[in-house]
Image (cartoon, rainbow, N blue to C red):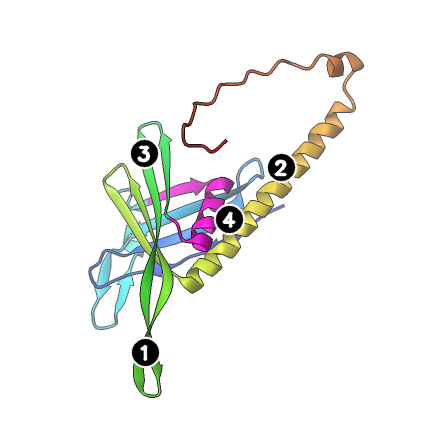
């Protein structure tokens, strides 16, 4: 089955330091659900129209990047949105390294009431992705955007569970057709010992 869900927040600013993010829930070549996060740095700012442009940097490898979040990282985002604690993740691939940070902050929201401006403290988050210490992509996330992104993250986790469940069912059906000898002598698995962590409470 084909999955296609996308959430694309664009955040230009007058300092020309904004970013466009695209969270894409789709399938890989094995039909497994995957979540890609594509990022583009802001190219320009038009002060008269108060609009920013990103498309000129879309194909520039120095100004754009793509990462992939697994289901646990998606869960960490949801947890940070819910309990408002920072989250940091590290991706290492060959000569490339990426640091993902999600930090909660309090934003002042202006609301006009009876002709006067009222200010309310509202929950917000700052998402930053640093790639190879040279590329930085930043996205401020407000409450409504966090709710919208949460729906996509939850859908992603659910699709991964569904895919894994169907994979287990396919494996079980294959085992039924194996000879009794192959069932009684399963291949030995090699398990790598996990590194010890002193701070884990168990």
Q: Quadrant of the N terminus?
A: top right
Residue at horizontal 38%, vertical 62%? 123
Which residue in the protein does label 3 denote? 97
The residue to which callout 4 is attached is 25
Kindly identify which numbered label has been placed on residue 164: 2
The magenta segment: 65-85
Mark nearer the N terminus (1 vs 4): 4
In the structure shown, which secondary structural element does the residue marked by tag 1 occupy?
strand
Seen at 20% across and 69% down, the residue is 47
Rounded to the nearest whole Å, what is the CA distance between mark 1 and mark 4?
38 Å
Query: Disc 2 vs disc 4: Cβ atoms closer than 8 Å?
Result: no
Which of the marked residues, 2 or 4, is nearer the chain's N terminus? 4
Look at the magenta stretch and give its main secondary structure: helix
Residue density around tag 3, few if under 14, some if 14–19, many if 20 or more, within 10 Å: few
Q: Earlier in the sequence, mark 3 or mark 4?
A: 4
Q: Is residue 36 above or below residue 97?
A: below
- The answer to whether residue 67 is magenta is yes
- What distance separates the C-alpha of mark 2 from that of mark 4? 16 Å
- Residue topped by disc 1: 118
x, y (%) of residue 42? 26, 55
> What x and y, as percent, mark residue 201?
47, 33
Separation of disc 3 and disc 4 at Cα?
23 Å
Is residue 113 rendered magenta in the image?
no
Which one is in front in this view, the residue at disc 3 or the one at disc 4?
3
Image quarter of residue 181? top right
Mark 4 burial class by Cα count in 10 Å: few <14, some 14-19, many 20+: many
Q: Position of residue 82 (x, y in %)?
A: 46, 54
């Amino acid at each position: 089955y084909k999955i296609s869900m996308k959430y694309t927040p664009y955040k230009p600013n007058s300092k020309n330091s904004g970013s466009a993010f695209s969270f894409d829930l789709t399938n890989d070549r094995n039909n497994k659900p995957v979540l890609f996060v594509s990022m583009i740095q802001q190219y320009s700012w038009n002060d008269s129209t108060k609009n920013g442009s990103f498309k000129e940097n879309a194909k520039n490898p120095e100004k754009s990047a793509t990462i992939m979040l697994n289901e646990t990282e998606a869960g960490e985002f949801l947890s940070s949105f819910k309990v408002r604690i920072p989250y940091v993740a590290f991706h290492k691939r060959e000569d490339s390294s990426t640091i993902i940070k999600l930090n909660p902050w309090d934003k002042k929201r202006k609301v006009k009431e009876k002709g006067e401006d009222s200010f309310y403290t509202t929950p917000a988050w700052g998402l930053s992705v640093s790639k190879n210490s040279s590329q930085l992509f930043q996205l401020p996330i407000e409450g409504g955007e966090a709710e919208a992104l949460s729906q996509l993250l939850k859908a992603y986790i659910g699709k991964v569970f569904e895919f894994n469940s169907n994979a287990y069912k396919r494996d079980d059906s294959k085992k039924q057709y194996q000879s009794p000898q192959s069932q009684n002598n399963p291949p030995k698995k090699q398990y790598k010992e996990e590194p010890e962590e002193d701070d884990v409470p168990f």
